[in-house]
Image: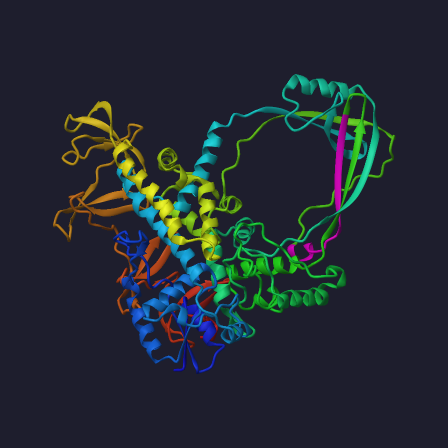
Amino acid sequence: MKNLIIVESPAKAKTISNFLGKDYKVVASKGHIRDLPKSTFGITIDENSGDFVPKYSIPREASATVKELKKLAKDAETIYIATDEDREGEAIGYHIAKAIGKEPTSLPRIVFHEITKSAINHALANPRTIDMNSVDAQQTRRLLDRMVGYKLSPLLASKIQKGLSAGRVQSSTLKLVVDKEREIKAFKPQEYWSINALFQKDIEASIIEYQAKKLDKLSIANQSLAEEIVDCAKSEEFKVQSIEQTQRKTKTPPPFMTSTLQQSASTQLGFSPKKTMMVAQKLYEGVKTHKGVMGVITYMRTDSLNLAKEAVESAREYIGTNFGDKYLPKSSKSYVTKSKGAQEAHEAIRPTMVEFDPKEAINYLSVDELKLYKLIYNRFLASQMSDAILESQSIIFASDSSKFKASGKRLIFDGFYKVTGYSEKDKLLPTLKENQSISLDDIKATQHFTEPPARYNEASLIKKLESLGIGRPSTYAPTITILQTRKYIEVEKKRIQPTEIAFTVIDMLEKYFPEIVDSNFTANMEELLDLVADGKANWQKILKDFYEPFMKKIEDGKKNIKSLKVAKPTGEMCPKCGEELLLRKGRYGEFIACSNYPKCRYTKNTDGTEAPEPEMTDKKCDKCGSPMVIKDSRRGKFLACSAYPKCKNAKPLNPPKELSVPCPECGSKILEKQGRKGTFFGCSNYPKCKFIANFEPIDKRCPECDYLMGQRTLRGKEVYECLKCKHKIKLEDA
């Protein structure tokens, strides 16, 4: 073997392998293979310099991968680091080099915005070295997050509730959600009235002026004023005061970057940010196309709006050929992001092949892949098309006391709407003349009340994070996921609502650690990280400036923050043992329990209803021998040891179904399991083996890669699909 190329993902490795000959072997690190330890702080302070020294280790699950990489590296003539082009990818490349015993800056580093044959060959012809400034920036972020998470989370757990966590980006994001909820709770409705008139020829108009005073939405604040305006209008004559017709251009939208893609996929496709990034990852790493397996979009974690010159030229050629010259502007269009610290050397998200249009893609992509690809493709084309032209119309009707305005518009030239679509209908006003008398056929006053501000949805929260400079493209989706996992937020009807515990946590952080939840502090930290990446700031100084005052607050907090875990006496006595009942806080809210716990386990809900007694079973705990009981949880009934909390053994009430097909990774049994999103199939040897499938594996091997296949329904048809390479076979062809 002459050359070894190391990437992160197996899918990416397979796609790149298709482009290269026998002189190259492409392997995957499967993500991070070196990180701070999970069980200890993992950061020491040098006694002489005071510098922070991270203690990296190789996680157990990555040890086999590292062993294989070392073996392959030993025999390789040249080792290329080909991890993703962002800072995290740079850091992963650095840790790969360290893990295999190589000096990071001695290995050639190749980067590419897209996984196509030409891009890979160009990258191999133009290698660079690992950018240590980017590594330091990512390392600074990792150490800051470890400091906050490892030192602040235990304090929250000790003062409020077990299992709580805090994070630099996580907590400032949660404060936005909590602040929005506070705003909603404090909102007081305000009365206002609207007045709409119907003039002859069915022209609808709204009042804009009364007694020479211009009116806004809230100007008519009560019924008496509304009735006064209506009575005056009914008694007066109206004339056409002015007629205006203006043309305006609607500018083309820029191509997508990460945040705008997540927002549009949420509003137009109903995709969560997490789902959007998972589907985009597949499109980037490689899918089947008319040219074989390759990446069909550029890198999806970006805050740049740049487009490659070649891509723009291809788009312009496609637009001219397929839509005509009127849809093609005289010169190409370029866009600049408004985000601070945007990495303009990167590209926006675009298709890698303009000829692979949605009509062609429908033959190769899955339903979700096609939806997202079409969104990306059409937005890219639209960014290089002509502006749309609309005509706006307005007519002002005036009497002695009032003025009403009627508005209309029509689409004169669709421009970029040709590909993105235009859903609004033309509303044309009839032809009238100035000073022409016109009759008032009807007038109506309607009472309204102002509405409280809407809660964030995932799209609007990401937009807010982006506008404030909190986080970066790679952090938006994971941050929302973490808040959900930690039970800090709930998403109901696509709206984000904080849980009760979120208010308690934010209250404490605002009082004792205001910088952690301050969006300006978090955004400024991102700017400092950008300076580190540019070689303009010392990363050790940033850590020192943060750590020393932060740790002083932690120590003060341990002594001075009053515990909120203290149970409150209710004045009631336990009906079972006679001891006092206490109001306690649990993971799922407040409840009432006996002060004689654990000797007495009486509990009841705060509304007075008693919690059901656990049902005894004849099964014995396989850890301590005590009887097992049936308990309820949010996910349903389960078996638990009656000796809890001394023994915390718990099992599913109904054992999961075992499949006859062995795990393709380790040979253990495959179990049918239930998760948040429904049924899935996983290895019984978890967490040692992390095999997982979303549909049932069957005893059939893939003709492409010899991996296990499963049977599923795709676009209304039954198919066999490989659980590894996604190769599909129709049942009738099998």
Q: What count of labels does the image hold? A: 0
Foreground residue, 131 or 454?
A: 131
Image quarter of residue 95: bottom left
Image quarter of residue 99: bottom left
**Is residue 324 depicted above or below 231 in this figure?**
below
Colouring rule applied to residues = rainbow
Foreground residue, 594 or 569?
A: 569
Report if residue 412 lies within the magenta region: yes
Image quarter of residue 203: top right
Q: Which residues are magenta?
A: 403-420
**Is residue 56 depicted above or below 168 in this figure?**
below
- Residue at figure coordinates x 79%, y 39% from the top left: 429
Foreground residue, 196 or 482?
A: 482
Report if residue 361 lies within the magenta region: no
- Residue at figure coordinates x 44%, y 83% from the top left: 22
- The answer to whether residue 431 shows anywhere in this view is yes
Q: Where is residue 315? Give x, y as percent.
A: 66, 65
- The answer to whether residue 722 shows anywhere in this view is no
- Residue at figure coordinates x 52%, y 25% from the top left: 188
Relative to residue 283, is residue 57 drawn left or right?
left
Q: Where is residue 652? Give x, y as percent.
A: 26, 51
Q: Where is residue 260? Give x, y as percent.
A: 55, 52
Q: Where is residue 663? Give x, y as percent.
A: 30, 68
Please identify the dominant SS of the magenta region: strand
Quadrant where the C terminus sits is bottom left
Foreground residue, 667 or 350?
A: 350
Instruction: Name the residue at the left extreme.
Output: 625
